[in-house]
Amino acid sequence: MPAASPLRVLAVANQKGGVGKTTTAINLGTALAAVGEKVLILDLDPQGNASTGVGVAESERHITSFDILTGRATIAKAGAKTLVPNLSVVPANADLVGLEAEMMAQASRPFRLRDAVTALLAEQRANPAEIPYTYLLIDCPPSLNLLTLNAMVAAHAVLVPVQCEFFALEGISQLKATIDQIRATLNPALEIQGVVLTMHDARTSLSKEVASEVRAFFGAKVYETMIPRNVRVAEAPSHGKPIMLYDYDSPGSQAYIRLAHEIIERERRLRAA
């Protein structure tokens, strides 16, 4: 991908389930859109929770990420508008479950998403009147499978949500080893954009211990902003809304706004380097 491209592709990944990947993808996407970025969330989880969380019902998922990965549609045509201005989503459904079997014999299988992103860039350059996407956030499934591999091969960087609970670091070294392996073989430019601590409870010593262990492991890659454990954040997806639309003033909503500013500042420094 050309370095001068305005589009930044970030994979939100961690093979552990329940760490806040989808919540982070939805609410970070909303916060980035709120500060003027044009954002596309690509839902790569067969459960389709990111699609539900931005209000796209299962019956409305006419073109999905399965169609993108099988070459039946382009990303530019698949983006569905959401309730949030400047935020679109390529939805997912259970069709993704069968993808691995369908692509097993194809040598190009790790590069399907990267090829689709390259096509999106070409389409954006060919239509300068259309406002181009500036961020593509890929919501990965909770495993290191072909879908996550496609995301990491297509991405500029990985954003890693880590839950502030016991066993949080379990698997983190495996994820880092996977990123290192992909960098060495399939995507030399891949980096960890940052690590976000989620479900943080400032009242417990366990949360503090986990936060300090993660900071010791990842150093400056860990964002200052921590996402608090917040009932409103957990409730929002069942209403088909990001937390900023569901309860703007809640601590969780304000944390995602701060995280978006932190990520944009980090991106600016990367571009200036």
Image (spheres, helix red, strand yellow):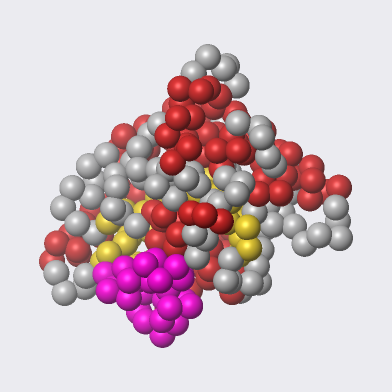
- In the rendered view, tell whether residue 65 sits above or below residue 187: below
Residue at x 46%, y 71% (from the top left corner): 241
Q: Position of residue 62 (x, y in %)?
A: 60, 49
Answer left or right for 235 relative to 96: left
Q: Write the start and end of the magenta stretch as one range.
A: 229-253
Residue at x 28%, y 53% (from the top left corner): 18
- In the rendered view, tell whether residue 208 sits above or below residue 215: below
Q: Which residue of the protein is positioned furthest toward the top in this rendering?
A: 105
Towards the viewer: 243 or 180: 243
Residue at x 14%, y 62% (from the top left corner): 206
Q: Which residue of the protein is positioned furthest toward the front in this rendering?
A: 59
Q: Which residue of the protein is positioned furthest toward the left in this rendering?
A: 205
Main SS category, magenta section: helix
Q: Position of residue 112 (x, y in %)?
A: 60, 31
Towards the viewer: 216 or 117: 117
Q: Quadrant of residue 267?
A: bottom right
Q: Position of residue 203 (x, y in %)?
A: 16, 74
Q: Does residue 96 belong to the magenta stretch?
A: no
Q: Position of residue 249 (x, y in %)?
A: 41, 85
Towards the viewer: 256 or 226: 256
Residue at x 49%, y 18% (from the top left corner): 104
- In the rendered view, tell whether residue 255 sits above or below residue 91: below
Q: Quadrant of residue 209?
A: bottom left
Q: Is residue 267 visible?
A: yes
Q: Which residue of the protein is positioned furthest toward the bottom in this rendering?
A: 249
Question: So how many labels did they put on this image?
Answer: 0
Q: Is residue 220 visible?
A: no
Towards the viewer: 97 or 222: 97
Quadrant position of the N terminus in the picture: top right
